[in-house]
Amino acid sequence: MAELAWHQTGVISGRQSPATEERARQCKMAYVYQGHIEKIPILQEILADAKIDASQVAYIGDDFTDIVIMRRVGLAVATANARAEVKRAAHYVTSAVGGEGAVREVVELLLKAQGKWTEILGKYEVE
């Protein structure tokens, strides 16, 4: 989906996971940072590299360490199974839980808001 969306994507995770690494590779994510609890320096690095402002970033989180980023980006999203504190910091809370379609839900939401959803459906001959 990252390729079709015409946007750069990535992950900043406090945990290390080979599964996350593999999924990021499959999705052709531009930025993959694992094992990072301090996320603000990573965000700043990504913003500088991508030459964008934080207001242009959508970020999905579920735990305390995500709130600092969520307060700095244009669209802060919490997953349905996020901690209550994270949900309070979010602009949007997904219907789906993390690992079960939450990212897909947000990507679809963004593509619809940008008027690109119909184009993608057409590519797959979906009516």
Image (cartoon, grey):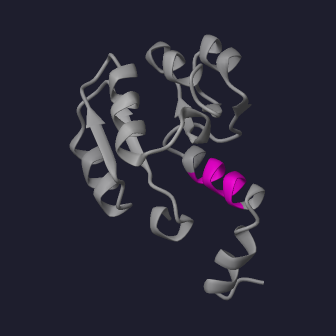
Residue 13 quadrant: top left
Range drawn in magenta: 104-111
Residue 16 lies left or right of residue 114; in this view the side is: left
**In the depicted view, which residue is nearer to us: 82 or 5?**
5
Residue 90 lies left or right of residue 44; in this view the side is: right
**Residue 109 covered by magenta stretch:** yes
**In the depicted view, which residue is nearer to us: 100 or 89?**
89
Residue 60 lies left or right of residue 76; in this view the side is: left
**Above or below — where is 123 with respect to 86?**
below
Where is residue 1 shown, x and y percent of the image? 50, 65
Q: Residue at x 28, y 36 (%)?
A: 33
**In the depicted view, which residue is nearer to us: 28 or 56?**
56
Residue 31 lies left or right of residue 117; in this view the side is: left
Residue 116 quadrant: bottom right
Q: Residue at x 28, y 27 (%)?
A: 15
**In the depicted view, which residue is nearer to us: 56 or 110?**
56
Where is residue 37 shown, x and y percent of the image? 32, 17
**Above or below — where is 24 with respect to 27?**
above
Q: Residue at x 24, y 26 (%)?
A: 35
- Report the quarter where the C terminus lies: bottom right
Query: Which secondary structure class fits the magenta region best?
Result: helix
Q: Residue at x 59, y 37 (%)?
A: 97
**Above or below — where is 4 with respect to 103?**
below
